[in-house]
Image (cartoon, rainbow, N blue to C red):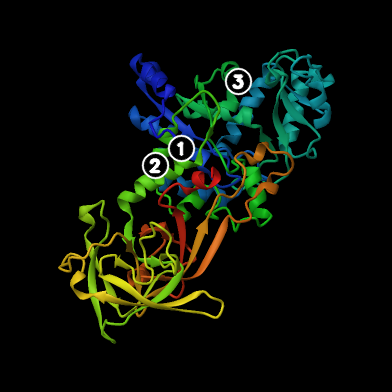
């Protein structure tokens, strides 16, 4: 897996434009999401590209919501999108909506009709689809194509007034039904939808199509570089045709390959199915690829921006290994996360030669990778919790943790030796008995003992109980969308494990969502939004190492 920074051919294009004084050397990009769902990791690449490339050349970026489809759009999605962009570390120059331009777009459509470049068509959606032909056979002209300019102006005005039912009429551009580009075969510009809009209410009952609204909105805002994903490449000639015929600011569209990530789906329609069918708890379920889900899981803005930069800007579609995203967050969290003690599968250990009722505070580093992170104190006492798998009754070769008669160092504390253990009736170990070496205190060790193993622990007297949520990949195949049948058939039934009996060091009682921790030897974790002082809940962001590849290649 390569972790090198990726190329950016768009930066080269813009650098040349700036050098040549195109648009006066000005750079203005835009990020135009449709508010019909939550943004996902694929959108983060577009966000980082549009905002980042503008910043690189001293330019600005507009945020424009493509809200031309009122049936699927909600204010909730608008607010979530704004929150995600800000969290990623970007600020937009202006906040616009395609709906801001409804009057102007309507006037543009009237201008096309007046130029005999648009007409009202009474054909049904099925009839229009049949007229389109195929990529290898020309389309057929609509019988309504010969309507006069006056008739079209009258019908379009009546469409605007709400005199017709949904689907009864559409406005189409008059271009070329024999064009090899299917998008030129008299595309639909407006359709009737008697649906309230999240911003304009019932003011409009006709709404522009994406291809008509997008380029004209760019031109209205005088966007210099309209950056889209590669699937819009075939739309570019139509984008330019509208701008040319309407004699608008010459915005230009550039395309790049969108981000596809393995072991997930990136279609908002499919993500919505996962939410509606209760396969996940919501758009921000930490197993989802949405930005809000990644934030909840403990990903950092820096890790996602770094990921987008490493992926680069390419012209060829490809699927990125989720391992690269995990590498980026590990790299960032290693620098930032506070190291803490957390025992996920507790086994009690009694240190029999440690005085009963005594406890002491020991010093440990907050982050060994950051000297400025400082230290903190943790309590130590006679009764501790250790991980159950840190003890083995009959140790295997090279097992350097606790076993009968074996010694191990307790992290930031003392060396202990297991002297005995007890079992439940089912044979499972229930308790370990040990003795400690008082002279072996970390940082002050005069014991002369050498041990190979170091394990973490929590004082039982001071431990804080918590629920731990361990997340795995949501799908058990690399590309669920390309598999046969319903993509939901490939959901991983073991994508969430909940540990209800974890014991944490007491400093974590004050933890809040957004705080970053490394549970020593276990991975990176963050408090969930469900967490409270009464019940701590932590999500695992990522393991310390990429164990997934090893497990699947055994």
Labels 2 and 3: the sequence-earlier one: 2
Residue closer to the observer: 226 or 287: 287
Residue 241 lies, in percent from the top left, at: 60, 17
Quarter assignment of residue 439: bottom left
Identity of the residue drawn at 44% across and 67% down: 394
Give yes or no for contact between labels 1 and 3 (Cβ–Cβ under 8 Å): no
Labels 1 and 3: the sequence-earlier one: 1
Q: In the image, is residue 6 above or below residue 96?
A: above
Q: Tell me the SS state at disc 2.
A: loop
Lateral position of residue 75 relative to residue 93, left or right: right
In the rendered image, the quadrant that contains the C terminus is top right
Residue under circle 2?
90
Q: Residues within 10 Å of mark 2 (few under 14, many from 20)?
A: some
Residue 480 lies, in percent from the top left, at: 64, 41
Q: Tell me the SS state at disc 1.
A: helix
Residue under circle 3?
242
Give yes or no for contact between labels 2 and 3 (Cβ–Cβ under 8 Å): no
The mark found on residue 47 in the picture is: 1
Give yes or no for contact between labels 2 and 1 (Cβ–Cβ under 8 Å): yes
Q: Residues within 10 Å of mark 3 (few under 14, many from 20)?
A: many
Nearer the observer: mark 1 or 3; the answer is 1
């Amino acid at each position: 897996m390569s972790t090198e920074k990726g190329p950016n051919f768009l930066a080269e294009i813009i650098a040349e434009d700036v050098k040549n004084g195109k648009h006066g050397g000005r750079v203005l990009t835009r990020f135009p999401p449709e508010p019909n769902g939550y943004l996902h990791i694929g959108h983060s690449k577009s966000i980082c590209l549009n905002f980042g490339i503008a910043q690189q050349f001293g330019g600005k970026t507009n945020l424009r919501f493509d809200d031309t489809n009122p049936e699927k759009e909600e204010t909730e999605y608008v607010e979530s999108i704004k929150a995600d962009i800000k969290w990623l570390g970007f600020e937009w120059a202006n906040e616009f909506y395609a709906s801001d331009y409804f009057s102007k777009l309507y006037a543009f459509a009237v201008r096309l009709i007046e130029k005999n470049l648009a007409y009202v068509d009474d054909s049904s959606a099925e009839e229009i689809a049949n007229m389109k032909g195929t990529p290898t056979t020309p389309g057929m002209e609509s019988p309504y194509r010969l309507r006069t300019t006056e008739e079209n102006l009258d019908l379009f005005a009546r469409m605007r007034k709400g005199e017709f039912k949904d689907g009864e009429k559409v406005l189409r551009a008059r271009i070329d039904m024999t064009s090899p580009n299917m998008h030129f075969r008299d595309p639909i510009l407006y359709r009737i939808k008697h649906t309230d809009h999240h911003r304009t209410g019932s003011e409009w009952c006709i709404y522009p199509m994406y291809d008509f609204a997008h380029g004209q909105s760019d031109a209205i805002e005088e966007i210099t570089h309209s950056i889209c994903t590669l699937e819009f490449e075939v739309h570019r000639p139509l984008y330019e045709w509208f701008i040319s015929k309407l004699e608008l600011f010459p915005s230009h569209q550039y395309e790049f390959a969108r981000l596809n990530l393995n072991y997930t789906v990136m279609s908002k329609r499919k993500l919505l199915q996962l939410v509606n069918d209760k396969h996940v708890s919501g758009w921000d379920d930490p197993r989802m690829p949405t930005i809000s889900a990644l934030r909840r899981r403990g990903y950092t803005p820096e890790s996602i921006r770094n990921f987008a930069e490493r992926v680069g800007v390419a012209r060829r579609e490809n699927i990125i290994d989720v391992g690269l995203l995990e590498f980026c967050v590990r790299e960032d969290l290693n620098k930032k996360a506070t190291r803490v003690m957390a025992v996920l599968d507790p086994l009690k250990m009694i240190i029999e030669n440690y005085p009963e009722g005594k406890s002491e505070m020991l010093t440990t580093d907050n982050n060994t990778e950051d000297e400025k992170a400082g230290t903190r104190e943790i309590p130590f006492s006679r009764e501790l919790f250790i991980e159950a798998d840190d003890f083995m009754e009959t140790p295997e070769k090279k097992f350097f943790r606790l076993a009968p008669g074996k010694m191990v160092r307790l992290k930031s504390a003392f060396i202990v030796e297991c002297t005995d253990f007890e079992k439940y009736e089912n044979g499972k170990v229930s308790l370990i008995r040990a003795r400690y070496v008082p002279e072996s205190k970390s940082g002050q060790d005069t014991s002369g003992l050498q041990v190979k193993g170091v394990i973490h622990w929590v004082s039982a007297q001071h431990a804080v109980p918590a629920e731990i949520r361990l997340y795995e990949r949501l799908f058990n195949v690399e590309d669920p969308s390309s598999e046969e049948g319903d993509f939901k058939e490939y959901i991983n039934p073991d994508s969430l494990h909940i540990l209800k009996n974890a014991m944490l060091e007491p400093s974590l009682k004050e933890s809040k969502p957004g705080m970053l921790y490394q549970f020593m030897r276990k991975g990176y974790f963050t408090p969930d939004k469900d967490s409270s002082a009464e019940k701590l809940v932590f999500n695992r962001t990522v393991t310390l190492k990429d164990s997934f590849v090893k497990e699947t290649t055994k």
